[in-house]
Amino acid sequence: MKKPFLICCLLVATFTIGQTNPTDEELIKAVLETQRTAWNNHDLSAFMETYWKSDALTFYGSSGVVRGWQATMERYQKSYPTPAHFGQLRFVLNDITEISDDAYYVLGEFYLTREVGNAKGIFMLVMKKIEGDWKIVADTSCTTP
């Protein structure tokens, strides 16, 4: 009787030891990969799920400041009306730095390859853990020549 229990405990311990929790940086990278994949599938709804669904969300781009999740969604809908405008998105992440236990900033570059003309630029995101999920709470993005 004791032998099967001991074997079971050893198996559980073996599997548990091999598993590690992902770091905050890995989780943030996963959010950005979700965002990139959604964009490349022209799925604006899934793309916007990475943003904090709040009136306090701030997007700062070349057209100025947009406040709120809904206004940010409308900005994207207006700026990217067709799959040709979406194109294919690629990120280069340059820095992910902890601000506090539940907040990071992310510095990076974006590259859009698309039919209506390629675009590239830089961004800084502020990401915060909200109800256990990492969300973008502020986005400063601008195109570069």
Image: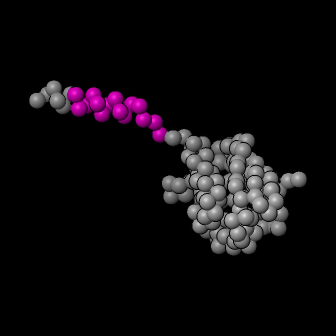
- At a point 83% along the width and 63% down the height, the residue shown is 62
Residue 106's place in the image compared with 53, above or below, is above
Magenta-highlighted residues:
7-21
- At a point 14% along the width and 28% down the height, the residue shown is 2
Q: Is 102 in front, or is 110?
A: 110
Tell me: 134 left or right of 142.
left
Identify the coloring: one colour
| Residue closest to the far left | 1
Tell me: 43 left or right of 131.
right
| Quarter location, residue 47 | bottom right
Task: Measuring from the top left, give residue 57's x and y in whole percent.
Answer: 67, 65
Task: Measuring from the top left, give residue 41's x and y in whole percent.
Answer: 61, 60
Q: Quadrant of the N terminus?
A: top left
| Residue closest to the far top | 3
Residue 81's place in the image compared with 113, above or below, is below
State whether the magenta stretch is mostly helix, strand or loop: helix
Q: Is 12 in front, or is 143?
A: 143
Residue 84's place in the image compared with 34, above or below, is below
- At a point 61% along the width and 46% down the height, the residue shown is 29
- At a point 68% along the width and 43% down the height, the residue shown is 97
Res. 69 in view: yes
Q: Is 139 in front, or is 35?
A: 35
Q: Is residue 12 magenta?
A: yes
Tell me: 6 left or right of 129.
left
Res. 67 in view: no
Tell me: 72 left or right of 142.
left
Q: Is residue 57 magenta?
A: no
Task: Measuring from the top left, give residue 116's x and y in whole percent.
Answer: 80, 63
